[in-house]
Amino acid sequence: RKLGVVLVGLGNYATHQLGPALRETQHCRLVGVVTGDAAKGAQWARDYGFPASSIYDYDTMDRMADNPDIDIVYAVTPNALHAEHCIKAAQAGKHVVSEKPFTVSVAEADQVIAACQKQDVKLSLGYRLHFDPYHAELRRLAASEEFGPFARMDGNFSFVMRNPQWRAEHGLAGGGPLMDLGVYIIQAALMAAGEQPPVAVTAKSLHKSRPEFFKDVEETLEWTMEFPRGERCRGYTSYNDNGNQFRAEAAKGWYQVGPAFGYRGLKASTSARGELSFPPFNQQAAQMDDFALCVKENRESKVNGEMGRRDMCIIEAIYRAMASGRRELVRYA
Ligand code: NAD
């Protein structure tokens, strides 16, 4: 049987990526939505063929417990609401997916992990690049040490934010582009470093061109991560620039991806083999199918709550370093 998925929050990513990708999955189907807009919910019910009784709002999520069609609840709301929506889903006895960033603090990550453990439901994250072939190649090169261990990494993920939105509000976003885009560079750097978490970070918030817009979040951030074997990664993320690339260098060669973090159209090259090309691939469908199989086969997702918590520890350390101007150790305990 295909597992029933409910999307919480019908914004851009749910509408243009996750909904259509669910149609491409082998092991999932959309069986309901959570939305504050009843008319939008009714339109989704017509488009995806689920009953009106499976349209919930944010205050009736507990009623999902009575709906046996629902197996998985996927939070696609602003960052600072992920924890609340994931906990409500777990309390309704459903398996949980949170979009990135997992939460906006380590404390919240702990609360979501505890709620899922208490209800004995599985927890996964919208870390779609773990299912992408170009990032699989990065992990393969890191593990095989074809060029030797990667020692220097560099990533940039930025876009120019033109319209005011929740991403520039600390209360809903939990931070600026680091939370939204920088998390992808952290993820790629960890892949290159063999998933050994960084020990220390430095960070600097750069000039704000629109301080009235980015009142309480950074507009542009530059940071470094130091890994246990001495590897280093420099990250750059901005809401006032364009960038989408990642490069990992080892003694005997390098691997570079750019665009590195998009949904499709990624490109990569290595010093040894020139340009690499993988067939078109639906990251979101692969990510959701993988979690459905984890649920069916009672396995942990490879992009689980612990990985999300680890990344929140790194993000918190980067914000501490940004505030103190000093090198900060990353605290995982
Ligand atoms: P969006 O603004 O388009 O959608 C957010 C949705 O949440 C809207 O439908 C909005 O109505 C709803 N919402 C519920 N309560 C809200 C509140 N109190 N304030 C504001 N909105 C509220 O945003 P999006 O781009 O779809 O992003 C949603 C989440 O998905 C974010 O966490 C983002 O980081 C993540 N995302 C992930 C990817 C990815 O590639 N994995 C891509 C885009 C977005």
Image (cartoon, grey):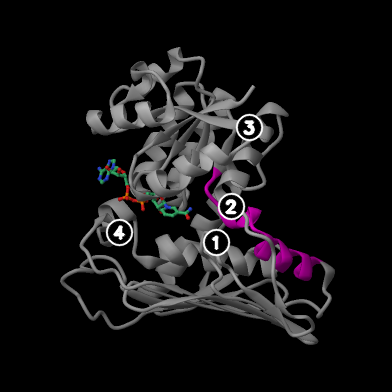
**326 lies left or right of 206:** right
Q: CA distance from mark 3 to mark 2?
A: 14 Å
Q: Which secondary structure, mark 1?
A: loop
Residue assigned mark 3: 27
Residue position marked by numbered label 2 in the rendering: 283
Residue at horizontal 65 percent and vertical 72 percent from the top: 227
**Mark 2 residue's CB less than 8 Å from ligand 1:** yes
**Mark 2: which amino acid?**
Gln
Mark 3 residue type: His
* Earlier-in-chain disc, 4 versus 2: 4
Q: Residues within 10 Å of mark 4 (few under 14, many from 20)?
A: many
> Which circle's residue, 4 or 3, is located before the other in the chain?
3
* Residue at x 84%, y 76% (from the top left corner): 146
On the image, the x and y values in percent for residue 102 come to 47, 49
> Looking at the image, can residue 123 be seen?
yes
Residue at mark 4: 167
